[in-house]
Each structure stands twice: as C-alpha cells, then as structure tokens.
Amino acid sequence: MSRTLDFRLPLRGAWLAAAPQDQSDCPTTNEVSTAEVEAQLRLETAVKQAREEERRQVEAELANEREALNALREGLLARLSEVEADLAGQVEAVLPELIIEGVGRVLKAWQPDADTVRKLVVEILAEHAESHQAARLWISVRDLDLLEAADASLRKSYPNLTLLADAELRSGEFVLESRFGQTDGRFETKVENLRKVLV
C-alpha cells in the first residue's frame, strides 16, 4: 500500500499528524491565531469606544455652548430692557422741555396774515367778552394795522370794544381786559401754561 494521497486541490500549509512537527519547509499560510483575532476585536472595540466618547464630548461641548449662548442672550435681553426703560425715562423727562422750546420757537417766528389776525380777535372776544360789554384789547401795532385795513365790521359787532396798539406785543399776542378780568395772551404766558400742563 502506498502512503501517497491524491488531492485534487493543493493543500497549502496543511500537515499530517504523522509528519514531523518542523514545518519550516512547508509553505506557510495566512493563519490568524485566536490571540490576533482577540487583539483585532479589542482594537475595534477600543476605536468604537473612543469614537463614542469623542461624540459624547462634542455633544456635551455643544450643549455647554448652547447654554452659554442662551445665558448671553437672556442677559442681553435683560440689559436691553433696562436700557430701554432708562432711555424711555430720559426721553420722558426731556420731551416736555423739547416740546415747550419748539412751541416757543414756532410762536416767535409766526407772522399771522390779516385773515388770521381777524379770526384770532373774533375767537378771543367770543371766549372772553360779550358784545354789549365794554372791553379793551391790546394787540401789536402790526396786527392792529392789518385788522383795521381788513375788517371794519368788527367794531360794529363789538361797539364797546376798544382796540389798542401795544408796541411790546408781538404779532399774534394780545391782552384783553373785560368784566371777567384780564386775559394774558402773550406767547411767554402761553408757553408757561403749556409748561405747567406738561411738567
């Protein structure tokens, strides 16, 4: 009997039990030992754990950044609310004076025409004097000239009205003296009355 075995495919790295243990002449295979498999598994597990740990750290850092941004936003909004309230208080404190100053400047620059002067005088008399009662109305020289040139019927409507020119009054100002007392229609008086209302 022959000890030769016939194999259709070559057996690389295979050895027989009866063969000597020294396999140095036999062709080697890419055998993977159990230790190598375990080492590879440990390496893959370590890499996976490292990636998972890195992901957790990045998520924690992002969460911390979000919290910091939220805290910053809340602080900024709170500060803006304080600044808004402070600014509103400052504007509220300054606004009346600005209004008063603006009204004063407008009144100083105002030059009413003849029709406006007539309407002002009629309005003043309607509010503060009766047509049959004696009254004296001081207006500026300019306004008196405009009024006399534009409307002679005013004296007919108010026969007991005495129109007087006052060089110290500006156009649009008046002082009326009637049975109800004296009505001061100077711009400074109007501005002061406005100041009392606003401040």
Image (cartoon, rainbow, N blue to C red):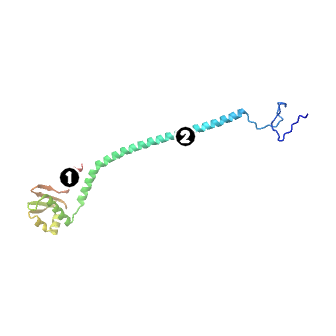
> Residue 119: horizontal and vertical position, in percent?
18, 64
- Tell me which amino acid carries mark 2: Val
- Tell me which amino acid carries mark 1: Asn
Q: How busy is the neighbourhood of tag 1: few (under 14 within 10 Å), some, or many (20 plus)?
A: few
Res. 20 image quadrant: top right
The mark tally for this picture is: 2
Q: Secondary structure at mark 2?
A: helix
Side of 168 relative to 87 (left or right): left
> Residue 50: horizontal and vertical position, in percent?
60, 37
Q: Which of the pair 37/172 is nearer the observer?
A: 37
Q: Which of the pair 135/28 is nearer the observer?
A: 28
Q: Does label 2 or label 1 sit earlier along the sequence?
A: 2
Vertical placement of residue 49 versus 161, above or below: above
Vertical placement of residue 139 versus 56, above or below: below
Question: Is residue 74 visible from the viewing direction of this image?
Answer: yes
> Residue 93: horizontal and vertical position, in percent?
28, 47
Q: Which of the pair 55/1 is nearer the observer?
A: 1
How far, Cα to Cα, is label 2 from label 1? 68 Å
Side of 44 relative to 68 (left or right): right
Farthest residue, direction front: 1
The label shown at residue 193 is 1
> Residue 82: horizontal and vertical position, in percent?
36, 43
Q: How busy is the neighbourhood of tag 2: few (under 14 within 10 Å), some, or many (20 plus)?
A: few
Identity of the residue drawn at 66% across and 36% down: 43
Q: Which residue is mark 2?
A: 58
Side of 161 relative to 1 (left or right): left
